[in-house]
Amino acid sequence: MSRPRKHSLTLHGHRTSVSLEDEFWAGLREMAAERGLGINEIVTEIDDARVTESGLATAIRLAVLRHYRARAGSAG
């Protein structure tokens, strides 16, 4: 696993930055592409869906994990 890398994003018109490992950035880009969304759009959806007090980076990692688990479950 790589070291976290910081990227700037715009959510609801506000700039923020998130640090994620390259593997999670790649998974997030793949999720966005599959849905025809940009990174800012999919992260905004993830942010809006957060129901816990966890940070945005954690919410993104969990969304990527759920995406790949769902994909693996539908492949079998």
Image: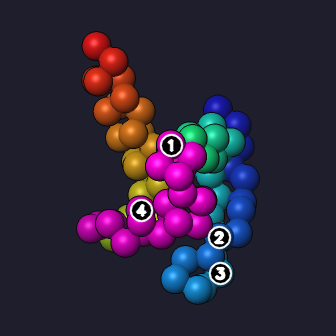
Per the model, the C-alpha gap separating discs 1 and 3 is 24 Å
Instruction: Give the side of residue 74 with respect to residue 45, left or right.
Output: left
Q: Could you say which is closer to the camera, residue 29 or residue 47? A: 29
**Marker disc for residue 9:** 2
Q: Mark 3 falls on what kind of element?
A: strand
Q: Residue sitting at 71 percent across and 62 percent down?
A: 7
Give 36 or 30, whichever is nearer the viewer.
36
Q: How many residues crowd around disc 2 within 10 Å: few (fewer than 14), some, or many (20 or more)?
A: some
- Label 1 sits on a secondary structure element that is helix
Residue that label 1 marks? 34
> Label 1 sits on what residue type?
Glu
Question: What is the C-alpha distance between the residues marked 4 and 3?
Answer: 16 Å
Q: Amino acid at mark 4?
A: Ile
What span is in magenta?
A: 32-52
63 relative to 18, above or below: above
Q: Quadrant of the C terminus?
A: top left
Report the residue marked by disc 3.
Answer: 15
The mark that comes first in sequence, 4 or 3, is 3
The structure residue drawn at horizontal position 32% and vertical position 33%, both measured from the top left corner, is 70
Q: Is residue 57 left or right of residue 75?
A: right
Q: Earlier in the sequence, mark 1 or mark 4?
A: 1
Disc 2, SS: strand
Q: Secondary structure at mark 4?
A: helix
Evaluate if marks 1 and 2 touch, with contact meaning CB atoms under 8 Å apart: no
Q: Left or right of 12: which side holds 4? A: right
Which comes before the other along the chain, label 1 or label 2?
2
Whether residue 61 can be seen here: no
